[in-house]
């Protein structure tokens, strides 16, 4: 028997069915729907294509969405100033802000680029801090650990 708390809830890490459902098991409704459609996929696909060719806008949209999925991202070509260190980041961030303000890139694209720049800045800072710590340890005679 599994233990329950005074409020009747199962204790953490326990449940009423410790074995649970097996990985990969499928719901009865899904299995029933698949068995009904089994062998009909080709005929259904052909019918949707025929409806689309006859001008059915829903069928046409369904076909187009399968052929050409919605593009979620695009490649950006944005000239940023050269970044050699942390001191160069403010100018790059300003260029991204200017590009968003002018409509050259979307706010979401600007946010993604700023986030990448921020990750790069943190990486540079971490490497710089590690170098400085190693020099301090060496000066104290402890050596790097």
Image (cartoon, helix red, strand yellow):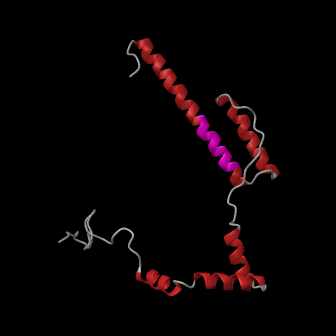
Q: Is residue 118 above or below residue 55?
A: above
Per the image, is 113 magenta? Answer: yes
Whether residue 134 sits left or right of residue 3 in the image: it is right
Percent position (x, y) of residue 8?
Answer: 25, 74
For residue 26, which quarter of the picture?
A: bottom left
Q: Dividing the image into 4 quarters, which one contains the C terminus? A: top left
Residue furthest left in the image:
1
Residue 68: x, y in percent?
Answer: 71, 67
**Displayed quadrant of residue 29:** bottom left
Residue 101: % across, % down: 79, 50
Q: Residue 98's x, y, as percent?
A: 78, 45
Query: In which quarter of the view is residue 122 placed?
Result: top right
Q: Main secondary structure of the magenta part?
A: helix
Q: Nearer the viewer, residue 47 or 89?
A: 47
Q: From the viewer's perspective, is 102 left or right of 58?
A: right
Between 22 and 139, the one lying in front of the other is: 22
Residue span colored magenta = 110-121
Is residue 128 rendered magenta in the image? no
Q: Please state if 20 lies on the left or on the right of 87 as rendered.
A: left
Q: Residue at x 39, y 12 (%)?
A: 141
Return the residue found at the far right: 102
Q: Is residue 145 above or below residue 43?
A: above
Look at 55% across and 26% down and name the residue there: 128
Question: In percent of the image, x 51 and y 21: which residue is there?
Answer: 132
In percent of the image, x 41 and y 79: which residue is there? 27
């Amino acid at each position: 028997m599994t233990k329950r708390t005074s409020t009747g809830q199962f204790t953490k890490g326990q449940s009423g069915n410790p074995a649970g459902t097996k990985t990969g098991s499928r719901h009865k409704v899904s299995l029933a729907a698949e068995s009904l459609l089994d062998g009909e996929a080709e005929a259904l696909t052909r019918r949707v294509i025929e409806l689309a060719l006859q001008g059915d806008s829903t069928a046409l949209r369904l076909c187009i969405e399968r052929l050409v999925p919605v593009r979620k991202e695009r490649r950006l070509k944005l000239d940023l100033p050269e970044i050699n260190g942390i001191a160069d980041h403010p100018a790059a961030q300003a260029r991204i802000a200017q590009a968003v303000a002018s409509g050259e890139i979307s706010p979401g694209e600007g946010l993604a680029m700023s986030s990448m720049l921020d990750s790069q800045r943190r990486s540079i800072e971490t490497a710089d801090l590690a170098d400085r710590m190693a020099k301090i340890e060496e000066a104290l005679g402890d050596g790097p650990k």
